[in-house]
Image (cartoon, rainbow, N blue to C red):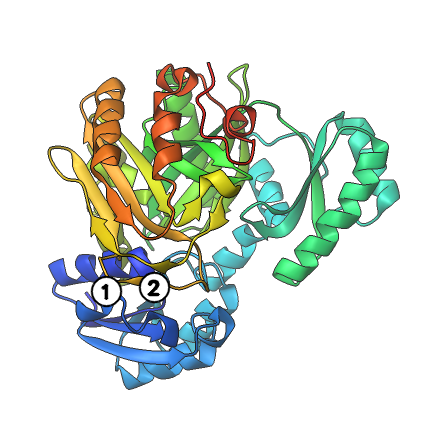
Amino acid sequence: MFGRVLIANRGEIAQRIIRACRELGVETVAVYSEADADALYLRQADETICIGPAAGGASYLNIPAIISAAEVGDVEAIHPGYGFLAENAHFAEVCNECRIHFIGPDPKTIAAVGNKANARALAIEADVPVVPGSDGPVADEDQASRVARETGYPVIIKASSGGGGRGMRVAHNEPSLINGFHAARSEALAAFGDDTVYIEHFVENPRHIEVQILGDRDGHVIHLGERDCSVQRRHQKLIEEAPSHAINAEQRLELGAAAVRMARAAGYHNAGTVEFLLDPGGAFYFIEVNARIQVEHTVTELVTGVDLIQQQLLLASGESLGFAQEDVVTRGHAIECRINAEDPTKNFQPSPGLVETFVAPGGPGVRVDSHCYGGYRIPPNYDSMIGKLLVHRNTRPEAIRTMLRALGEFVIEGPATTIPIHRNVLAHTDFVRATHDTGFMERYFSQPGSLGVGS
């Protein structure tokens, strides 16, 4: 096991990694920008190093600054968390060249699965179901039109290097296809420096199901069950739960086996997620591989009892998986609500600023992962998520009731937060019956200023 690890991230995930390291007896070096100088997790790290001003490009995305901090901090490994450099193959390669362990997959694997068009081709080779669409990148309007006609409208244009809903456009006819093709390319180039796109048939009213995987360097790969991430707004996840109530036992086995096949085909090791769409008829299709820890890894931890961050550390240090697929047992039901500093009454406008009061809920089955505290000032420079509220109970109805109780106890004064919208979502009939899909938020909560519950 490593003796000292640098955390190349911020917020709740930085705090989460520090806690995992501390339990393993590993010292931590936390880097921070000038905007995060008063962050709670800095008090918990063994050493802290400022790496630049508030702008992410000058700090958390600044590879030379992070490597310099790693050398000054005399660390053996770097944990990238999620976001920022977590899926940057070049950063992983630089770490290797500097003889610093990157806590994640190999650079070649990150590059292979990070390009969605390439990952799609890899899935086909691994006999993992994919949505009908182009065989690879689509170069021009003529090819886009031909693929769309063959696939059948509606279609979705996707950025090969995309993420977070950027570089994606849905088209229901040829005029919207041409407009969407150019818009997706332009957005992808601006966001990712790569305007490569591909096309798939647009699956309407799907569920978003993802499977957690773990792999070691000896080629052993297992999965830890699925998560349902269907409550989304503009492709951004709001609520996640495990297990999914949208699939049966047979589908669960098929999804897990498909995820493992995909991971093995990619030569994957460490923690990752294989994401799928589940159509209304029960068929599932591969979307992408996230070559990192996910925000929602916590619901899997609750239902399996496996500390995924500790597993990442152990696997990156060269240890083999300490358990087999048959040892993975899922117990109960877990739900996670992402608590964002956003105002749902103003079209989810970010709400940075001073947290005057922060009182977290507690009681049986409740977990809060957050870097916030009363007196903390939320900077405007980064993602608006300020915490995750999780519950774990024996059944889904119990978990919903406990989550509603915990949301009612959660007091955050100062910034607007998504707590009110979460309470309305969990009380909605479609969510209670587990009949919701990825269009749920747009159908019932799309009007600016609307917090009403649909019937």
Q: How many marks?
A: 2
Q: Mark 1 or mark 2, which has the lower sequence index? A: 2
Crowding around mark 2 (Cα neighbors within 10 Å: few <14, some 14 to 19, many 20+) is many
Residue 41 — which label?
1
Residue 354 lies, in percent from the top left, at 32, 60
Up the image or down, 360 lies above or below 39; here it is above
Up the image or down, 140 lies above or below 303; here it is below
Residue 16 occupies quadrant: bottom left
129 horizontally vs 157: left or right: left
Please tell me which residue is depicted at 62% across the width and 60% down the height of the picture.
Answer: 192
Residue wearing tag 2: 10
Please tell me which residue is depicted at 27% across the width and 62% down the height of the picture.
Answer: 376
Residue 399 lies, in percent from the top left, at 24, 25
Residue 165 lies, in percent from the top left, at 58, 45
The answer to whether one can see residue 167 in this image is yes
207 horizontally vs 355: left or right: right
Which of the pair 52/353 is nearer the observer? 353
408 horizontally vs 66: left or right: left
Q: Are marks 1 and 2 in contact (CB under 8 Å)?
A: yes
Q: Secondary structure at mark 2?
A: loop
Which of the pair 409/158 is nearer the observer? 409
Q: Secondary structure at mark 1?
A: helix
The answer to whether one can see residue 306 in this image is no
Residue 279 occupies quadrant: top right
Callout 2, which amino acid? Arg
Up the image or down, 35 lies above or below 81; here it is below
- How far is mark 1 from mark 2, CA to CA? 8 Å
The quadrant of the rendering that contains the N terminus is bottom left
Callout 1, which amino acid? Tyr
Q: Residue furthest right?
A: 142
